[in-house]
Amino acid sequence: MRMSATLIAAASALALAAPLHAKTIAVAAGEGAQTRLQEALILAAPGDVVELGAGRFVLTDGLSLDVKGVTVRGKGMDATVLDFTGQKGAGEGLLVTSDDVTLRDFAVENTKGDGIKSKGADNVVYYRVRVTWTGGPKETNGAYGIYPVESIGVLIDGCKVSGASDAGIYVGQSKAITVRYNYVEQSVAGIEIENSRDALVTGNLVTRNTGGILVFDLPNLPVMGGGNTIIEGNLVIANDTPNFAPKGNIVAGVPRGTGVMVMANDGVLVKGNRIADNPTGQVLVVSYPKPFTDKTYNPLPRNVIIDENRFSGGGDDPQLPGGEQLKAAFGGRLPDVIWDGTGKQGPILNYRGAYLSLGIPGPEAGMAGAKPELVEPKIPVVIMFPSTEGAPKALDARARP
Amino acid sequence: MKLLAAALLLSAAALAAKPSDTLRPPVLSAAGPVVNTTLVNDAVISGSEFPARLSDFNFFTDSAASRPGIGVIAYRLNTPLWSDGADKSRFLYLPPKGQATAHGEGLLGLPVGAALIKHFTFGGKLVETRVLLHRADGWVALPYVWNAEQTEARLALAGKRIELVTPAGQAISYAVPNKNQCKDCHSQDGAVIPIGPKAYNLSPQWLAGLRSSGWIDQVPKVSRRIPLWEDRAKVKVADAARGYLDANCAHCHSPQGAASNSGLYLGWTVKDRMALGVNKRPVAAGRGAGPHEFAIVPGKPDQSILLYRMASTEGGVAMPELGRETRDPDGEAVVRAWIAGMH
């Protein structure tokens, strides 16, 4: 009998994909959890599964994983809890610095700094992970819940974050990103895509944050030029928690009650979302408002396309300078789409309706120079829609084998 | 201190001695091994295991690890990393026939088989010893914790918390880093590397001694050295502060370090004022920024995030993130004076 060449190729591909001696290392909650769990994370070999038992792991220090291709799996986001309430040191609960890691089915609570950070960790999967600060929104909560940075290939799927004093889910300086089916509440920013490209943010519920979904590009960073991002099919509902970010943070400037906010960036499509009851503005398109010296940085929003979305409510309690007068001028409610007026061209509206231009002459002018007006959208001549499939397809298989 | 002094003396004597053969271990002859218990165990350094005890390396000739073995050379940094006031003693091990190489002002090139050893002592008692081993596939960092009897240090892969009192009299829960946390600081583009032995933070005399004994190919050329920490009141405050920031921050805050995404780079040779934090806004500092908007506000240390985080001991705010439970008043003072005088 002869095997076909294809079959042989497939078989050897399989053999290569699955390490020969992959093993499962079980770690139970209870006495000595800090040492036992950290040792497991150090001694794991590529391909191994570190399996966390049900229960509460009481931890005093941040954990870290630096082995490629390891899966850390719990018994479910409510059953397995890494409890950092008594954390003494380290900047985050769990730090991942190796590629091809899968984190799934466990929770991280009350870290002093960020919840879970993966840095320079390509092809990372977060699936059904929960990060919670149990005391509700507080300035003393850690900054980011789920925090991949400087990575190519990021999938965040089915996760739940609550109480982050910066962004619940923050993806920074990365590429090929999918953020889908997550639930983020009571954080300053629900989901933030920053200085990143090729991001697909879809099917998420973001509610009761200060701002729902933010797409930012900031100056003076190793990776800039964010864009080609799609925000599609999300529920962006009643993000009305007062901003509790420490003053120095960039998100401290996000007005309470922002639905979707696009700052700087090139190529952002906002499409098919349900955007409701965000009291400042349902969609804000703005430039980076602060002084900068970085000559390679473009502070203006470009090619921002607001396609069909379902809007309702919102804009009825704007936290913008002069917001009350604006509101009165527009009959008690601001238009759904607000542009600060900077850049050559406003957002391209691919739906019937006018948007509010604040008529700010330049990025750093502020509201002092504002000349608000209602702008009827021109029929766009050519639209280059952002197009991306987000994270590589291979990552799907790790979330849903 | 006695221990440190002894070690320094010993290696100073060894360095002064000529010819270099006196420092070199005897070569094992094919006829039969020369039994010498003071030989460093090269097989353990370059193997793939994580030795359970510090003594497995034979870096020292006594169980208290105070007398360096052959090829183990004591050194100091002009300005060191501050670790809750711990007394530290540092050693470089070079294998037989191994030689360090000069690479400009930065890190010395160290051959495979080399090791760096650092003792941490509080109140005259050894608490931990960290070793960095240069293996064929890269550097490996391992922490060893000393027993109460001071006779043995055992590997603590997952780190450990130790209750102790600092020289300033503060009772702290001292954190021995786990193996991965070693890498948090000892990392460049994801690979483990040494931090300390950069030519610009080493004494020219020590480097000259290394050269004359044949342990290094040439003396590295250094245009500007970090000043000695004990001379901080005598030198330009900017030099003292920049030296301190290099030794305490720049291993992460560099374009290749763990804090690369911050855009804040604090190395000795950095010239870009924005990268150094002057009027630079934080990126992902979270609540670490406190009420402040810029890393450094010239002339205003109390409005500068840099000093705010140095002066905090709270997780999520305190910098460095690892290895500091208490405040360093001397370090804060130089950084404060530097920012205050800046315009």
Image (cartoon, coloured by chain):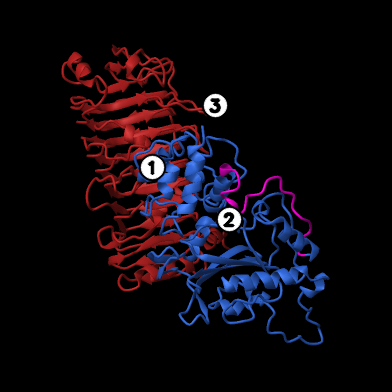
Chain colours: A red, B blue
Q: Are marks 2 and 1 in contact (CB under 8 Å)?
A: no
Say few, some or many: other residues with alpha carbon within 10 Å of mark 1 (under 14 / 14 to 19 / 20 or more). Answer: many
- Mark 3 or 1, closer to the camera: 1
Q: Secondary structure at mark 1?
A: helix
Q: Looking at the image, is B156 positioned above or below residue A141?
A: below
Residue denoted by label 3: A295
Whole-angstrom CA distance, mark 2 to mark 1, is: 30 Å
Q: Tag 2: residue type?
A: Glu
Residue denoted by label 1: B289
Residue sitting farthest toward the left: A332
Which stretch did the figure color magenta?
Answer: B215-238
Say few, some or many: other residues with alpha carbon within 10 Å of mark 3 (under 14 / 14 to 19 / 20 or more). Answer: few
The picture places residue A156, in percent across and down from the top left corner, at: 37, 47
Q: Tag 3: residue type?
A: Lys
The picture places residue B241, in percent across and down from the top left corner, at: 54, 46
Name the image quarter holding the N terminus of chain A.
bottom right
The picture places residue B275, in percent across and down from the top left corner, at: 53, 38
- Mark 3 or 2, closer to the camera: 2
Residue denoted by label 2: B230
Is residue A150 something that shows in the picture? Answer: no
Q: Tag 1: residue type?
A: Ala
Q: Secondary structure at mark 2?
A: helix
Query: How many numbered marks, from 0 up?
Result: 3
Residue B4, image quadrant: bottom right
Q: Looking at the image, is B53 positioned above or below residue A232?
A: below
Q: Residue at x 23, y 53 (%)?
A: A134
Q: Residue at x 33, y 63 (%)?
A: A74
